[in-house]
Image: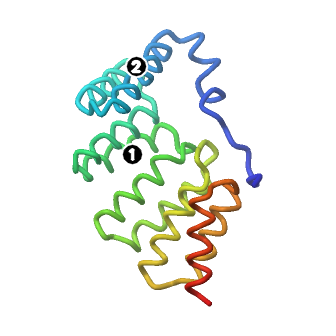
Amino acid sequence: MKENFKTITFKEKYGEESEKNSDLNFALKLLEKAEIAHQSNDLENAINLYKESIKSFPTADAHTYLGWMYSLQGNLEEAIVECHKAIKIDPDFGNPYNDIGCYLMQKKEFDNSLPWFNQAKKAARYEPRHFPYLNASRVKLIQGKHGQAKHELHQALMREPDDENLKNKFRELVSLLN
């Protein structure tokens, strides 16, 4: 589904500038190394690499992913702080909005999570676009608002039509409502 606003990719955000700015270029390389450490489940190394990246050149990406590492360690408050830092650096980056919403869900602050998912939906730089809709659907289900949950899940499916898991969730919800 085509969004009604211009979307920005990671490469569009950083590509040209990183060619001219050696600090940013180095920071982005550290981001790549941190991602590898995360995928290897080496959270401490990933955290240290994200912090090094931020010292070299603070990006919304590094703060958001550092927050994610903190959340995996159960430190939701610090994760939220990092996401707020990310938003301050790049308000067009959708991940920290969605992540704050998820962390608030984990804290059972469901009503407070919804505005964050709505912000993520409008962010120009955000992939995967269906996540905030899926997360909002989860909140609506918890709240017993099944019709609204169905709408959110349908919006997620419109943005990721080939996702079999989403299709199954949507069918299950529709059958629940019938």
When the figure is inspected, residue 115 is found, relative to residue 123, above or below; the finding is below
Secondary structure beneath label 2: helix
Instruction: Give the residue displayed 27% in from the left and 43% down from the top.
Output: 70
Q: Position of residue 159 (x, y in %)?
A: 68, 56
Q: Quadrant of residue 69?
A: top left
Q: Position of residue 93 (x, y in %)?
A: 54, 43
Left or right: 111 in relation to 123: left
Q: Nearer the viewer, residue 36 or 60?
A: 36
Instruction: Give the residue displayed 55% in from the left and 85% down from the top.
Output: 176
Left or right: 135 in relation to 70: right
Q: Which residue is mark 1?
A: 83
Total label count? Answer: 2
Left or right: 151 in relation to 100: right
> Tag 2: residue type?
Leu
Residue 176: give its label.
none
Secondary structure beneath label 1: helix
Q: Position of residue 125 (x, y in %)?
A: 61, 42
* Image quarter (top left, top right, bottom left or bottom right) of the C terminus: bottom right
Q: Position of residue 58 (x, y in %)?
A: 41, 27
> Tag 1: residue type?
Cys
When the figure is inspected, residue 48 is found, relative to residue 65, above or below; the finding is above
Q: Give the mark nearer the N terminus: 1 vs 2.
A: 2
Q: Which residue is mark 2?
A: 30
Instruction: Give the residue displayed 38% in from the left and 32% down from the top.
Output: 39
Label 1 – label 2 distance at C-alpha: 19 Å
When the figure is inspected, residue 88 is found, relative to residue 133, above or below; the finding is above
Q: Can you name the residue that lies furthest to the bottom here? A: 178
- State which mark lies toward you, 1 or 2: 2
When the figure is inspected, residue 68 is found, relative to residue 161, above or below; the finding is above
